[in-house]
């Protein structure tokens, strides 16, 4: 449908079928050439995006922005795709296709709460119910809501699905059961036959590092990165792999590139901060920890790790302040008390609540 609309739009905009030049000096291709691009493989996506860039002006229809968002999404340029789909939603906030794409983009930007809100708006749609149920299940898993994920998966008729969807279903089911993929047979099946499916790629590369040879893993991942250089998830897995094989400097540069492909990502900042801590660069670790929003989901780990960074930097004053403030909020987390006592000693019990049997109290 999107291809037909774009073709009609191009025909309407171009007076002649011959190559012409617009008032900005940009060459607009003839309709036959654009039609061939629309019918070609995904490798031509960037060319289509370039021509759409020339067509779109202020006040362009919401559907033209949706078309460009779709092509940007397919080429995995998620930040740009999100900007376009938000432009579409301003004009048509109830359009099913717009909401579906906005949810998928939010999911890939790891903004899971926003993605869930979008998918909840369209979960009653019958035409694409299976797709929406899959997306609801996946985003629920990302939010650690395994009960809801299982509920959505149980509504899917597994016998009517194609093979790749059945594998995807098994992965999500497995994730609900043990909070991660632990089935080597399932992982190997993805790697051998279904590595091109975008849904399966993410799960494969996040879990296959311990189940396959480093040589095979590296070659598979690099081939896809060459095909999709803007995919932050593939690059994130590449950074982890580089770190594992002790290529720390390249891993650092890759992590920095990944950070630029997200609008804001607390879990990524936490991961990069831990990476720098592991390599004893505590100042850079603090730089990324400080980017994390004060959300209770990450507050425990971030406060604890930041306090350790201050300690290793020799800043005992900030270390103590961080520990004290964290203890006020996380009274039941014993890590803070233990670490504080380890480096500052046991404070004197002025009220003598805990009495030493060997101590003599003089009147």
Image (spheres, rainbow, N blue to C red):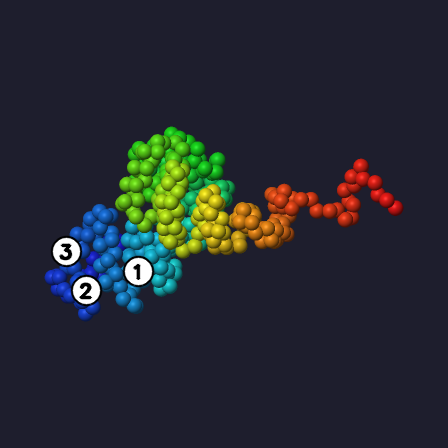
Q: Report whether residue 129 is seen.
A: no
Nearer the viewer's eye, disc 2 or disc 3?
2
Q: Is residue 241 above or below residue 18?
A: above
Secondary structure found at label 3: helix
Name the residue tied to disc 3. Answer: 32
* The disc label shown at residue 50, or none: none
Q: Which percent across, then down, holds residue 103?
A: 39, 52
Of pointers 1 and 3, the one earlier in the residue sequence: 3
* The disc label shown at residue 26, or none: 2
Direction from residue 32 to residue 129 in the image, left or right: right
Name the residue tied to disc 1. Answer: 65
Asked whether 131 or 353 is in front, the reply is 353
Asked whether 22 or 314 is in front, the reply is 314
Secondary structure found at label 2: loop
Q: Which percent across, then down, holds residue 279?
A: 45, 43
Q: Residue at x 56, y 49 (%)?
A: 314
Q: Report whether residue 291 is seen.
A: yes
Inter-mark Cα distance, 1 to 3: 22 Å
Q: Residue at x 36, y 45 (%)?
A: 250
Inter-mark Cα distance, 2 to 1: 20 Å
């Amino acid at each position: 449908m999107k291809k037909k609309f774009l073709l009609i739009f191009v025909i309407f905009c171009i007076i002649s079928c011959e190559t012409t030049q617009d008032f900005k000096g940009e060459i607009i291709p003839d309709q036959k050439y654009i039609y061939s691009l629309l019918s070609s493989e995904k490798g031509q996506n960037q060319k289509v995006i370039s021509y759409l860039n020339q067509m779109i002006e202020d006040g362009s229809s919401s559907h033209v922005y949706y078309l460009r968002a779709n092509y940007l999404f397919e080429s995995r340029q998620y930040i740009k795709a999100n900007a376009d789909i938000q432009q579409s939603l301003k004009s048509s906030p109830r359009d099913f296709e717009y909401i579906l794409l906005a949810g998928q983009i939010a999911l890939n930007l790891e903004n899971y709460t926003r993605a869930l809100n979008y998918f909840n708006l369209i979960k009653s749609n019958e035409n694409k119910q299976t797709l929406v149920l899959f997306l609801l299940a996946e985003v629920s898993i990302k939010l650690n809501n395994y009960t809801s994920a299982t509920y959505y998966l149980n509504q899917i008729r597994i016998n009517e699905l194609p093979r790749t969807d059945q594998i995807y279903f098994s992965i999500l089911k497995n994730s609900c059961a043990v909070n991660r993929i632990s089935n080597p047979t399932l992982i190997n099946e993805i790697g051998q036959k279904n590595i091109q499916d975008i849904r399966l790629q993410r799960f494969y590369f996040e879990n296959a590092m311990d189940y396959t040879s480093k040589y095979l893993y590296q070659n598979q991942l690099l081939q896809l990165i060459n095909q999709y250089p803007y995919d932050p998830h593939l690059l994130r897995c590449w950074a982890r792999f580089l770190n594992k094989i002790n290529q720390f400097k390249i891993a650092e540069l890759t992590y920095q590139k990944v950070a630029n492909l997200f609008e804001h990502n607390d879990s990524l900042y936490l991961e990069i901060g831990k990476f720098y801590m592991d390599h004893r660069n505590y100042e850079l670790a603090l730089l990324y920890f400080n980017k994390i929003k004060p959300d209770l989901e990450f507050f425990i780990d971030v406060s604890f790790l930041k306090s350790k960074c201050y300690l290793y930097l020799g800043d005992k004053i900030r270390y103590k302040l961080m520990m004290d403030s964290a203890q006020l909020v996380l009274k039941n987390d014993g890590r803070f008390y233990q670490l504080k006592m380890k480096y500052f000693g046991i404070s004197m019990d002025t009220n003598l609540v805990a009495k030493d049997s060997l101590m003599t109290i003089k009147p």
